[in-house]
Image: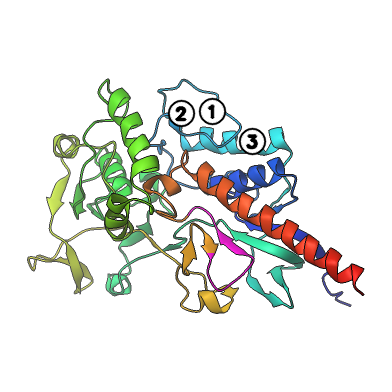
Amino acid sequence: MEHPARLESVETVIVGGGQAGLATAYEMQRRGRPAVVLDAGQRVGDSWRHRWDSLRLFTPARLSHLPGMQVPAGGWSFLTKDEFAAYLEAYVDRFGLDVRLGTRVERIEREGARYLVTAGATRLLAEQVVIATGAYQDPKVPVFAPELAADIVQVHSSGYRNPRQLQEGPVLVVGAGNSGAEIALELAGTHQVSLSGSAPVFPVRPGSLPSRVVMPAFFFAASRILTVKTPLGRKMRPRALHHAAPVVRVRPRDLAVAGVQRVPRVTGAEGGLPVLADGQRLDVRNVVWCTGFQSDHSWVQLPAFASGDEPEHERGVVRDEDGIYLVGQRFQYSLSSSFVGGVGRDAAYIAGAIAERAKRRERERAMAGSTA
Protein backbone atom coordinates (compact mmCIF):
# COMPACT_ATOMS: atom_id res chain seq x y z
CA MET A 1 0.00 0.00 0.00
CA GLU A 2 1.36 3.42 -1.00
CA HIS A 3 1.38 5.98 1.80
CA PRO A 4 0.84 9.67 1.08
CA ALA A 5 3.89 11.90 1.48
CA ARG A 6 4.18 13.66 4.83
CA LEU A 7 3.56 17.41 4.68
CA GLU A 8 6.35 19.39 6.35
CA SER A 9 5.91 23.03 7.33
CA VAL A 10 8.92 25.31 6.86
CA GLU A 11 9.43 29.03 6.87
CA THR A 12 11.33 29.44 3.60
CA VAL A 13 12.16 27.08 0.74
CA ILE A 14 15.02 27.95 -1.61
CA VAL A 15 14.81 26.08 -4.91
CA GLY A 16 18.30 25.51 -6.32
CA GLY A 17 21.55 24.75 -4.52
CA GLY A 18 23.98 26.59 -6.78
CA GLN A 19 25.79 29.79 -5.86
CA ALA A 20 22.57 31.86 -5.86
CA GLY A 21 20.66 29.51 -3.58
CA LEU A 22 23.54 28.96 -1.17
CA ALA A 23 24.32 32.67 -0.89
CA THR A 24 20.66 33.28 -0.06
CA ALA A 25 20.63 30.51 2.56
CA TYR A 26 23.72 32.04 4.17
CA GLU A 27 22.13 35.50 4.26
CA MET A 28 18.97 34.02 5.76
CA GLN A 29 21.04 32.34 8.45
CA ARG A 30 22.75 35.65 9.26
CA ARG A 31 19.32 37.13 9.93
CA GLY A 32 18.29 34.25 12.16
CA ARG A 33 15.67 32.94 9.73
CA PRO A 34 15.51 29.23 8.86
CA ALA A 35 15.60 28.11 5.24
CA VAL A 36 15.61 24.77 3.44
CA VAL A 37 17.51 24.46 0.15
CA LEU A 38 16.22 21.89 -2.36
CA ASP A 39 18.54 20.74 -5.14
CA ALA A 40 18.21 18.02 -7.78
CA GLY A 41 21.92 17.12 -7.72
CA GLN A 42 23.38 14.23 -5.80
CA ARG A 43 26.19 16.42 -4.48
CA VAL A 44 26.45 20.12 -3.79
CA GLY A 45 28.06 21.69 -6.86
CA ASP A 46 26.87 19.07 -9.36
CA SER A 47 25.59 21.76 -11.72
CA TRP A 48 29.25 22.75 -12.15
CA ARG A 49 30.71 19.23 -12.19
CA HIS A 50 28.48 18.27 -15.10
CA ARG A 51 29.81 20.97 -17.42
CA TRP A 52 32.60 20.39 -19.94
CA ASP A 53 35.81 18.99 -18.51
CA SER A 54 38.19 21.85 -19.36
CA LEU A 55 35.96 24.68 -18.14
CA ARG A 56 37.47 27.30 -15.86
CA LEU A 57 35.78 30.30 -14.29
CA PHE A 58 36.11 33.50 -16.29
CA THR A 59 36.70 35.69 -13.24
CA PRO A 60 39.73 35.35 -10.93
CA ALA A 61 39.37 33.75 -7.50
CA ARG A 62 39.43 37.14 -5.75
CA LEU A 63 36.21 38.07 -7.59
CA SER A 64 34.55 34.64 -7.42
CA HIS A 65 33.55 34.07 -3.80
CA LEU A 66 30.23 33.94 -1.99
CA PRO A 67 29.45 36.10 1.06
CA GLY A 68 31.22 35.05 4.23
CA MET A 69 33.92 32.80 2.73
CA GLN A 70 36.84 33.49 0.43
CA VAL A 71 37.89 31.03 -2.26
CA PRO A 72 40.95 29.09 -1.00
CA ALA A 73 43.08 29.85 -4.05
CA GLY A 74 45.48 32.49 -5.34
CA GLY A 75 43.68 35.76 -5.96
CA TRP A 76 44.56 35.84 -9.64
CA SER A 77 44.09 32.13 -10.34
CA PHE A 78 41.09 30.80 -12.26
CA LEU A 79 39.31 27.87 -10.63
CA THR A 80 38.37 24.80 -12.62
CA LYS A 81 34.70 23.89 -12.55
CA ASP A 82 35.48 20.98 -10.17
CA GLU A 83 37.45 23.24 -7.83
CA PHE A 84 34.52 25.63 -7.67
CA ALA A 85 32.12 22.75 -7.02
CA ALA A 86 34.34 21.70 -4.11
CA TYR A 87 34.25 25.28 -2.82
CA LEU A 88 30.43 25.18 -2.81
CA GLU A 89 30.51 21.90 -0.83
CA ALA A 90 32.91 23.44 1.67
CA TYR A 91 30.64 26.50 1.92
CA VAL A 92 27.66 24.35 2.92
CA ASP A 93 29.74 22.44 5.46
CA ARG A 94 31.23 25.56 7.01
CA PHE A 95 27.90 27.24 7.66
CA GLY A 96 25.82 24.10 8.23
CA LEU A 97 23.25 25.07 5.61
CA ASP A 98 20.19 22.82 5.33
CA VAL A 99 20.59 21.47 1.77
CA ARG A 100 18.47 18.51 0.70
CA LEU A 101 19.97 16.78 -2.32
CA GLY A 102 18.37 14.56 -4.93
CA THR A 103 15.23 16.65 -4.61
CA ARG A 104 13.96 18.02 -7.92
CA VAL A 105 11.09 20.46 -7.44
CA GLU A 106 8.22 19.61 -9.78
CA ARG A 107 5.56 22.09 -8.73
CA ILE A 108 4.94 25.22 -6.69
CA GLU A 109 1.36 26.28 -6.03
CA ARG A 110 -0.72 28.27 -3.60
CA GLU A 111 -2.11 26.53 -0.53
CA GLY A 112 -4.14 29.14 1.29
CA ALA A 113 -1.77 31.84 2.55
CA ARG A 114 1.27 29.62 1.98
CA TYR A 115 2.97 27.75 -0.86
CA LEU A 116 3.00 24.02 -1.47
CA VAL A 117 6.31 22.84 -2.89
CA THR A 118 6.21 19.33 -4.37
CA ALA A 119 9.35 17.34 -5.20
CA GLY A 120 8.51 13.67 -5.71
CA ALA A 121 7.54 12.27 -2.33
CA THR A 122 8.68 15.48 -0.63
CA ARG A 123 5.96 18.04 0.12
CA LEU A 124 6.80 21.27 1.91
CA LEU A 125 4.39 23.97 3.00
CA ALA A 126 6.31 27.25 3.02
CA GLU A 127 5.66 30.84 4.03
CA GLN A 128 8.10 32.04 1.35
CA VAL A 129 9.79 30.52 -1.67
CA VAL A 130 12.98 31.71 -3.36
CA ILE A 131 13.54 30.50 -6.92
CA ALA A 132 17.31 30.34 -7.36
CA THR A 133 17.56 27.98 -10.32
CA GLY A 134 19.35 30.50 -12.51
CA ALA A 135 18.20 32.72 -15.32
CA TYR A 136 17.87 30.03 -17.96
CA GLN A 137 17.65 26.29 -17.42
CA ASP A 138 16.54 24.48 -20.57
CA PRO A 139 19.00 23.85 -23.44
CA LYS A 140 17.92 25.64 -26.61
CA VAL A 141 18.47 24.19 -30.09
CA PRO A 142 17.04 25.33 -33.44
CA VAL A 143 13.72 23.84 -34.55
CA PHE A 144 15.41 22.32 -37.61
CA ALA A 145 17.89 20.25 -35.57
CA PRO A 146 15.79 17.03 -35.97
CA GLU A 147 16.08 17.44 -39.75
CA LEU A 148 19.80 16.68 -39.69
CA ALA A 149 20.82 13.18 -40.74
CA ALA A 150 20.53 10.52 -38.06
CA ASP A 151 24.22 9.60 -38.37
CA ILE A 152 25.34 13.12 -37.42
CA VAL A 153 26.23 13.27 -33.74
CA GLN A 154 24.46 16.21 -32.12
CA VAL A 155 25.23 17.45 -28.61
CA HIS A 156 24.28 20.64 -26.80
CA SER A 157 26.98 22.45 -24.85
CA SER A 158 25.17 21.42 -21.64
CA GLY A 159 25.88 17.79 -22.51
CA TYR A 160 29.36 18.25 -23.98
CA ARG A 161 32.24 16.99 -21.84
CA ASN A 162 35.26 16.41 -24.10
CA PRO A 163 36.24 15.55 -27.72
CA ARG A 164 35.89 11.80 -27.10
CA GLN A 165 32.11 12.16 -27.26
CA LEU A 166 32.25 12.96 -30.96
CA GLN A 167 32.90 10.66 -33.90
CA GLU A 168 35.67 11.12 -36.44
CA GLY A 169 35.11 13.72 -39.10
CA PRO A 170 34.34 17.45 -39.34
CA VAL A 171 32.55 19.32 -36.55
CA LEU A 172 30.25 22.31 -36.79
CA VAL A 173 30.05 24.38 -33.60
CA VAL A 174 26.99 26.63 -33.69
CA GLY A 175 27.26 29.69 -31.48
CA ALA A 176 30.44 31.70 -30.97
CA GLY A 177 29.94 32.93 -27.42
CA ASN A 178 32.13 31.80 -24.53
CA SER A 179 31.08 28.14 -24.63
CA GLY A 180 31.22 27.94 -28.43
CA ALA A 181 34.63 29.59 -28.70
CA GLU A 182 36.18 27.45 -25.95
CA ILE A 183 34.70 24.18 -27.23
CA ALA A 184 35.69 24.97 -30.84
CA LEU A 185 39.26 25.69 -29.78
CA GLU A 186 39.44 22.46 -27.79
CA LEU A 187 37.99 20.36 -30.62
CA ALA A 188 40.44 21.83 -33.12
CA GLY A 189 43.11 19.62 -31.56
CA THR A 190 41.37 16.46 -32.82
CA HIS A 191 38.88 17.51 -35.52
CA GLN A 192 38.37 19.82 -38.45
CA VAL A 193 36.16 22.54 -36.94
CA SER A 194 33.83 25.16 -38.40
CA LEU A 195 32.46 27.83 -36.06
CA SER A 196 29.22 29.64 -36.87
CA GLY A 197 28.25 32.89 -35.20
CA SER A 198 29.85 35.99 -33.76
CA ALA A 199 30.17 37.73 -30.41
CA PRO A 200 32.03 40.73 -29.01
CA VAL A 201 35.40 40.09 -27.39
CA PHE A 202 36.41 41.22 -23.89
CA PRO A 203 39.26 43.74 -24.25
CA VAL A 204 41.87 41.85 -22.21
CA ARG A 205 42.74 38.20 -21.75
CA PRO A 206 42.10 36.79 -18.26
CA GLY A 207 45.35 36.26 -16.38
CA SER A 208 47.29 38.87 -18.33
CA LEU A 209 48.88 41.83 -16.55
CA PRO A 210 46.40 44.31 -18.11
CA SER A 211 43.52 42.18 -16.84
CA ARG A 212 44.60 42.83 -13.24
CA VAL A 213 43.61 46.44 -13.78
CA VAL A 214 40.71 46.02 -16.20
CA MET A 215 38.82 43.15 -14.55
CA PRO A 216 38.42 44.76 -11.09
CA ALA A 217 37.40 48.01 -12.79
CA PHE A 218 34.89 46.14 -14.96
CA PHE A 219 33.51 44.30 -11.91
CA PHE A 220 33.11 47.60 -10.06
CA ALA A 221 31.26 49.14 -13.01
CA ALA A 222 29.10 46.02 -13.46
CA SER A 223 28.18 46.09 -9.76
CA ARG A 224 27.90 49.80 -8.93
CA ILE A 225 27.30 51.73 -12.15
CA LEU A 226 25.38 49.40 -14.46
CA THR A 227 22.32 48.90 -12.25
CA VAL A 228 18.56 49.33 -12.60
CA LYS A 229 18.93 52.49 -10.51
CA THR A 230 21.13 54.38 -13.01
CA PRO A 231 20.22 55.77 -16.44
CA LEU A 232 23.22 53.99 -17.99
CA GLY A 233 22.26 50.70 -16.38
CA ARG A 234 18.63 50.94 -17.48
CA LYS A 235 19.77 51.70 -21.01
CA MET A 236 22.14 48.73 -21.06
CA ARG A 237 19.85 46.17 -19.40
CA PRO A 238 17.81 45.19 -22.51
CA ARG A 239 20.99 44.69 -24.50
CA ALA A 240 22.56 42.59 -21.76
CA LEU A 241 19.47 40.39 -21.59
CA HIS A 242 19.10 39.79 -25.32
CA HIS A 243 22.60 39.88 -26.79
CA ALA A 244 25.62 37.62 -26.44
CA ALA A 245 28.05 38.40 -23.64
CA PRO A 246 31.64 39.19 -24.66
CA VAL A 247 33.95 36.24 -25.22
CA VAL A 248 36.35 36.44 -22.30
CA ARG A 249 39.20 33.98 -22.75
CA VAL A 250 39.48 32.97 -26.42
CA ARG A 251 40.79 35.48 -28.97
CA PRO A 252 39.87 35.36 -32.69
CA ARG A 253 43.58 34.84 -33.41
CA ASP A 254 43.59 31.74 -31.16
CA LEU A 255 40.87 30.22 -33.31
CA ALA A 256 42.60 31.14 -36.56
CA VAL A 257 45.94 29.68 -35.45
CA ALA A 258 44.20 26.47 -34.36
CA GLY A 259 42.67 26.12 -37.83
CA VAL A 260 39.05 26.83 -36.85
CA GLN A 261 37.12 27.98 -39.92
CA ARG A 262 34.63 30.80 -39.37
CA VAL A 263 31.42 30.29 -41.34
CA PRO A 264 28.14 32.25 -41.74
CA ARG A 265 25.07 31.76 -39.60
CA VAL A 266 23.29 28.39 -39.75
CA THR A 267 19.79 28.94 -41.16
CA GLY A 268 18.33 25.45 -41.61
CA ALA A 269 18.85 21.91 -42.84
CA GLU A 270 18.68 20.42 -46.33
CA GLY A 271 19.33 16.84 -47.37
CA GLY A 272 20.23 16.04 -43.76
CA LEU A 273 23.02 18.65 -43.65
CA PRO A 274 23.20 22.10 -42.01
CA VAL A 275 22.70 25.04 -44.37
CA LEU A 276 24.48 28.37 -43.94
CA ALA A 277 23.19 31.86 -44.67
CA ASP A 278 25.15 31.93 -47.95
CA GLY A 279 23.37 28.78 -49.14
CA GLN A 280 26.31 26.46 -48.53
CA ARG A 281 25.63 22.99 -47.14
CA LEU A 282 28.25 21.76 -44.70
CA ASP A 283 29.17 18.09 -44.90
CA VAL A 284 29.87 17.44 -41.21
CA ARG A 285 29.76 14.41 -38.95
CA ASN A 286 29.16 16.25 -35.69
CA VAL A 287 27.27 19.34 -34.53
CA VAL A 288 27.77 20.99 -31.15
CA TRP A 289 24.95 23.39 -30.32
CA CYS A 290 26.31 26.26 -28.22
CA THR A 291 23.05 28.09 -28.68
CA GLY A 292 22.30 28.87 -25.07
CA PHE A 293 19.36 28.17 -22.82
CA GLN A 294 15.80 29.29 -22.45
CA SER A 295 13.75 30.08 -19.39
CA ASP A 296 11.10 27.64 -18.23
CA HIS A 297 9.02 28.35 -15.17
CA SER A 298 6.08 26.18 -16.22
CA TRP A 299 6.50 24.21 -12.98
CA VAL A 300 5.60 27.33 -10.99
CA GLN A 301 1.80 27.20 -10.99
CA LEU A 302 1.18 30.82 -10.03
CA PRO A 303 -0.46 33.63 -12.04
CA ALA A 304 2.70 35.76 -12.08
CA PHE A 305 4.49 32.93 -13.92
CA ALA A 306 1.68 32.18 -16.38
CA SER A 307 3.84 33.04 -19.39
CA GLY A 308 6.47 30.48 -18.35
CA ASP A 309 9.11 33.18 -18.58
CA GLU A 310 10.63 35.51 -16.00
CA PRO A 311 7.86 37.25 -14.04
CA GLU A 312 7.71 40.97 -13.32
CA HIS A 313 9.81 41.73 -10.26
CA GLU A 314 11.52 44.51 -8.36
CA ARG A 315 15.09 43.44 -7.55
CA GLY A 316 13.86 39.86 -7.29
CA VAL A 317 10.71 40.56 -5.28
CA VAL A 318 7.99 39.19 -7.55
CA ARG A 319 5.14 41.60 -8.16
CA ASP A 320 1.59 40.38 -7.57
CA GLU A 321 2.81 37.30 -5.67
CA ASP A 322 3.56 38.16 -2.07
CA GLY A 323 6.05 35.61 -0.74
CA ILE A 324 7.81 34.60 -3.98
CA TYR A 325 11.34 35.78 -4.77
CA LEU A 326 14.05 35.34 -7.40
CA VAL A 327 17.84 35.23 -7.06
CA GLY A 328 20.42 34.66 -9.79
CA GLN A 329 18.54 36.24 -12.69
CA ARG A 330 20.51 38.06 -15.36
CA PHE A 331 20.68 41.78 -14.55
CA GLN A 332 18.37 41.23 -11.57
CA TYR A 333 19.73 44.44 -10.07
CA SER A 334 23.00 44.98 -11.91
CA LEU A 335 25.09 43.51 -14.69
CA SER A 336 26.96 41.49 -12.05
CA SER A 337 23.79 39.84 -10.67
CA SER A 338 24.48 36.55 -12.45
CA PHE A 339 28.25 36.61 -11.80
CA VAL A 340 29.53 34.22 -9.14
CA GLY A 341 30.97 37.12 -7.18
CA GLY A 342 27.98 39.39 -7.76
CA VAL A 343 25.10 37.25 -6.56
CA GLY A 344 25.77 37.95 -2.88
CA ARG A 345 24.31 41.45 -2.92
CA ASP A 346 21.04 40.25 -4.46
CA ALA A 347 20.93 37.37 -1.97
CA ALA A 348 21.33 39.82 0.91
CA TYR A 349 18.57 42.06 -0.43
CA ILE A 350 16.13 39.18 -0.82
CA ALA A 351 17.01 37.71 2.59
CA GLY A 352 16.33 41.11 4.13
CA ALA A 353 12.97 41.36 2.36
CA ILE A 354 12.00 37.87 3.55
CA ALA A 355 13.05 38.58 7.14
CA GLU A 356 10.92 41.72 7.19
CA ARG A 357 7.94 39.85 5.74
CA ALA A 358 8.34 37.01 8.23
CA LYS A 359 8.44 39.44 11.16
CA ARG A 360 5.39 41.28 9.85
CA ARG A 361 3.41 38.06 9.55
CA GLU A 362 4.45 37.03 13.06
CA ARG A 363 3.18 40.36 14.41
CA GLU A 364 -0.09 39.96 12.49
CA ARG A 365 -0.62 36.47 13.90
CA ALA A 366 0.21 37.65 17.42
CA MET A 367 -2.30 40.50 17.13
CA ALA A 368 -4.95 38.15 15.75
CA GLY A 369 -4.34 35.74 18.64
CA SER A 370 -4.61 38.51 21.25
CA THR A 371 -8.00 39.63 19.94
CA ALA A 372 -9.44 36.10 19.60
**For residue 89, above or below residue 211:** below
**Which image quarter holds the C terminus?**
bottom right
* Label 2 CA crowd tier, 10 Å (few <14, some 14–19, many 20+): many
Q: Main secondary structure of the magenta part?
A: loop
Range covered by the magenta-colored residues:
318-328
Q: What element carries label 3?
A: helix
Q: Which mark is residue 61?
A: 2
* The quarter of the displayed image where residue 39 is located: bottom right
Judge from the rendering whether residue 279 lies leftward or rightward of residue 141; answer left or right. Answer: left
Kind of residue at disc 2: Ala
Kind of residue at disc 3: Tyr
* The quarter of the displayed image where residue 3 is located: bottom right
- Whole-number angstrom distance, CA of label 2 to CA of label 3: 15 Å
* The quarter of the displayed image where residue 204 is located: top left
Mark 1 and 3 residues: CB-CB less than 8 Å, in contact? no
Mark 2 and 1 residues: CB-CB less than 8 Å, in contact? yes
Residue position for label 1: 71
Residue at image x 26%, y 30%?
205
Find out whether residue 154 is within the magenta segment.
no
Residue 140, percent across and down?
37, 65
Of all residues, the one furthest to the left in this rendering is: 278
**Which image quarter holds the N terminus?**
bottom right
Earlier residue among tags 1 and 3: 1
Residue 11, percent across and down?
75, 59
Q: Residue 91 carries which label?
A: 3
Kind of residue at disc 1: Val
